Amino acid sequence: MDIHRLLQGSNLGMNDIEQIAAAYERTLRALSLKDRNDPIAEMIARKIIQIADSGLRDPAEVSAHAIKELGVPPP
């Protein structure tokens, strides 16, 4: 899952998209998830976008919130 595909057509600026993508990548690394085709990768991408839509943009904070909200234990 490439998070950029989910962000196509959004009204977000390039900086916002870069921050959201960084949060997504950070979350995948934190969970040691390498397979972008794993269904959890799409769940993570959607959660990251949902959190970012609430106004939070710091990649570290967005990632931490996503992991907590998804209830995914780190390896």
Image (cartoon, grey):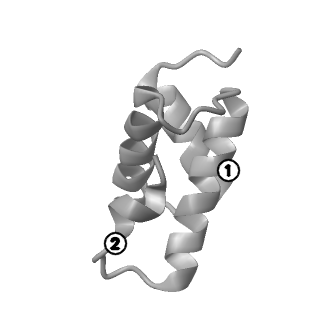
Q: Earlier in the sequence, mark 2 or mark 1?
A: 2
C-alpha separation, residue under disc 2 versus residue under disc 1? 23 Å
Element type at mark 2: loop
For label 2, the residue is 8
Residue 42 position in % (x across, y down): 40, 39
Element type at mark 1: helix
Mark 1: few, some, or many residues within 10 Å (few <14, many ≥20)?
A: some
Vertical side of 21 occupied by 69: above or below = above
* Front position in the image: 40 or 12: 40
Amino acid at the residue labelled 2:
Gln
Residue 4 position in % (x across, y down): 45, 64
Determine the residue positioned at 38% across, 35% down. 43
Is the C terminus in the top left, top right, bottom left or bottom right quadrant? top right
The answer to whether marks 2 and 1 mark residues whose Cβ atoms lie closer than 8 Å is no
Number of marks in picture: 2
Determine the residue positioned at 66% across, 27% down. 31
Can residue 18 be seen by looking at this rendering? yes
For label 1, the residue is 60
Task: Find residue 38 and name its label.
Answer: none
**To which quarter of the image does residue 33 belong?**
top right
